[in-house]
Image: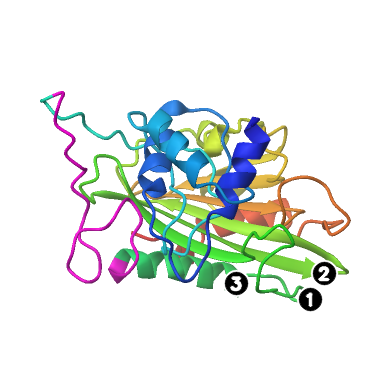
């Protein structure tokens, strides 16, 4: 199985409702922040792959995790991880102490399935849908390769204490026979992400890319328009608010597995200035 197969497999394991029982969120959370390498989510059924990913990722960390009812984020890519402390006793297999979910019980893994944080992830999806440009439709359901056309997720980051959270949401947008995506990822304060706008932008899923600074009022936003390592994301903008909250806004010509296909968009839904402006918009400033 190559990297693309892994990404496809992990994507397909995520569904918006009902939530599957998973340990994968913890794995991807661990894998993203520390591992710092390409691993976007994708494709067809893979419990085994997720278990493998979990084992490989367990000490590094994450940017945003995959899976869970948190709405599940089939497009969650590698970002910056949460390292899970190793028990003092090497023989101790103590599980991480997760924050409380909405039912007052500890979460099953890094992903919130109810409660305040879950609702923040859901709100992020609602805000994406609210900014879809006029003339564009907002399809529901899933793609032919079983990727949900809408998804949202909230996942604890850092040391699992619940001090730092990541929210991820994406929504398909369609026009003239083509379907693409708008995506937003938000990290609460104390997230450890870079300060400089372009460095911040290039750190998105560790994709790099050719960055430029776009000014929105007095705000400086890092925007990558080309050169990113993931063919499934065409452009993205990054902005750090004064309180440390980081917002990424991204768009893609495809809603499928990142490869060009007959159903891809000819034109992206947002202009670069619009994408940058949304990254600074208060509606995406979630704590």
Mark 3 — residue?
129
Going 51% across and 39% down the picture, which residue do you hit?
49
Looking at marks 2 and 1 on the same chain, the residue that comes earlier in the sequence is marked by 1
Mark 1 — residue?
135
Q: State whether residue 175 is above or below residue 107.
A: below
Mark 3–mark 1 distance (CA, rounded to whole Å): 13 Å
Task: Provide residue 266's location: percent of width, then percent of height.
Answer: 87, 56
Range drawn in magenta: 90-116
Looking at marks 3 and 1 on the same chain, the residue that comes earlier in the sequence is marked by 3
Mark 2 — residue?
175
- What is the residue that sits farthest to the left in this orientation? 89
On residue 147, the disc is: none
Q: Is residue 193 in view?
A: no
Q: State whether residue 32 is above or below residue 283.
A: above
Mark 2 touching mark 1, by CB under 8 A?
yes
Going 46% across and 71% down the picture, which residue do you hit?
18
Task: Provide residue 144's location: percent of width, then percent of height.
Answer: 74, 62
């Amino acid at each position: 199985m190559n990297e693309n197969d892994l990404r496809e497999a992990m994507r397909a394991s995520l569904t918006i409702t009902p939530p599957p029982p998973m340990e994968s969120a913890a794995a991807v959370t661990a894998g993203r922040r520390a591992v710092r390498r390409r691993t976007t989510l994708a494709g067809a059924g893979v419990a085994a792959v997720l278990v493998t990913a979990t084992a490989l990722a367990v000490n590094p960390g994450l940017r945003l995790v995959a899976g869970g009812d948190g709405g599940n984020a089939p497009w969650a890519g590698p970002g910056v991880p949460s390292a899970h402390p190793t028990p003092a006793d090497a023989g101790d297999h103590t599980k991480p102490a997760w924050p409380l979910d909405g039912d007052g019980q500890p979460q099953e893994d890094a992903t919130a399935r109810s409660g305040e944080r879950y609702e923040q992830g859901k709100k992020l999806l609602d805000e994406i849908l609210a900014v879809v440009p006029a003339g564009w439709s907002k399809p529901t359901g899933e793609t032919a390769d079983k990727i949900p056309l809408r998804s949202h997720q909230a996942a604890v980051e850092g040391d699992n204490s619940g001090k730092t959270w990541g929210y991820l949401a994406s929504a398909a947008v369609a026009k003239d026979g083509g379907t693409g995506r708008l995506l937003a990822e938000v990290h609460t304060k104390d997230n450890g992400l870079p300060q400089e706008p372009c460095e911040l932008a290039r750190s998105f899923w560790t994709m790099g890319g050719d960055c430029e600074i776009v000014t929105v009022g007095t705000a400086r936003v890092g925007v990558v328009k080309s050169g990113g390592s993931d063919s499934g994301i065409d452009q993205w903008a990054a902005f750090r608010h004064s309180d440390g909250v980081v917002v990424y806004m991204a768009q893609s010509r495809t809603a499928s597995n990142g490869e060009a296909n007959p159903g891809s968009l000819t034109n992206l839904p947002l202009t670069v200035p619009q994408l940058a402006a949304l990254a600074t918009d208060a509606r995406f400033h979630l704590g």
